[in-house]
Image (cartoon, grey):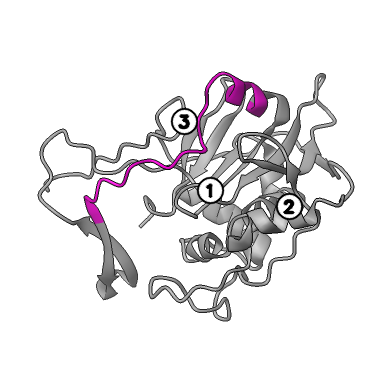
Amino acid sequence: MSGYLLVALACIYAPILLASDGPGPEILAFSSFAVQQDHDHWANSTNLICESSDSPFLPPSSEDLIYKFDQVDLKSTPQPFRDGFFKSTCFVNPIDNDPADFCIFVNPTVNRGQGIVILAPEKEFEQSLAEGLELSDDLPNLDTIEVVDMPEKGGKGAVAARDIQVGEDVALMRPVALVPLGHAVWSTSFGQSVRRQTIDHLPLRTRAEVARLHGEGRNEDQFISNLIDVNTFNSEISKFNPLGAVMVDASL
């Protein structure tokens, strides 16, 4: 396979294009709702959240990592939303003339168990689902790429699993996280905490994969926020709020 690796990112309406950047207006958090008696419903649907992993590709524990992926404690119990998604904490921009609340939505079972978490305005996300945005079905595995040990790279790497023809799709994948771009809040300690809380909603194995991506920071919040800045691709679920997509497989 020569020159470059063409990855077909068939996960949302528009193609995922460039590395993300940039911060915008501050947001304040409020609890979306009190914890109700749906804990068992949530727990039964998210057994991957606490499942231990014996995969040789994942770190056995977070002992030597900045992000303690195996020590997550969610602050609220996500409630059933729609299309397999649960709704968790929400955040609002108080200085906007028409403030839109950003909420954490998670489906922990899609992506072959990797799950997906989305931080987006509720109305826009719900409208996108109503208009046909499909994130609940798994995409086909094209068996074109395999992950192998690459000590010279300091970890893992992706190589072709077979001969790939010119113009052939190499992979179809969905992101494990979609987070808004262009808000100055991400450079604040509050915004960094929001980003880390968003990633906290992913299943344990996926958090372990995220934890090994490149990032810098003195604490978990700084590390996750920086990791998102350097490991996301631009995308959107509406024309109003561009989102950064975290792709753990594409980041190898």
Q: Is residue 223 above or below residue 19?
A: below
Label located before the other in sequence (2 or 1):
2
Q: Residue at x 23, y 45 (%)?
A: 5
Q: Quadrant of residue 65?
A: bottom right
Give the labeled residue for mark 3.
12
Q: Nearer the viewer, residue 184 or 94?
A: 94
Whole-percent x, y for residue 62 in the image: 57, 76
Q: Residues within 10 Å of mark 3 (few under 14, many from 20)?
A: some
Q: Residue at x 23, y 37 (%)?
A: 169
Give the labeled residue for mark 1.
229
Q: Are marks 3 and 1 in contact (CB under 8 Å)?
A: no
Q: Residue at x 75, y 59 (%)?
A: 74
Secondary structure at badge 2 equals helix
Q: Main secondary structure of the magenta part?
A: loop
Q: Nearer the viewer, residue 122 or 217?
A: 122
Q: Which residues are magenta?
A: 125-145
Give the labeled residue for mark 2.
41
From the image, state whether disc 2 or disc 1 is nearer to you: 2
Residue 193 visible in the picture: no
Q: Amino acid at mark 1?
A: Asp
Secondary structure at badge 3 equals loop
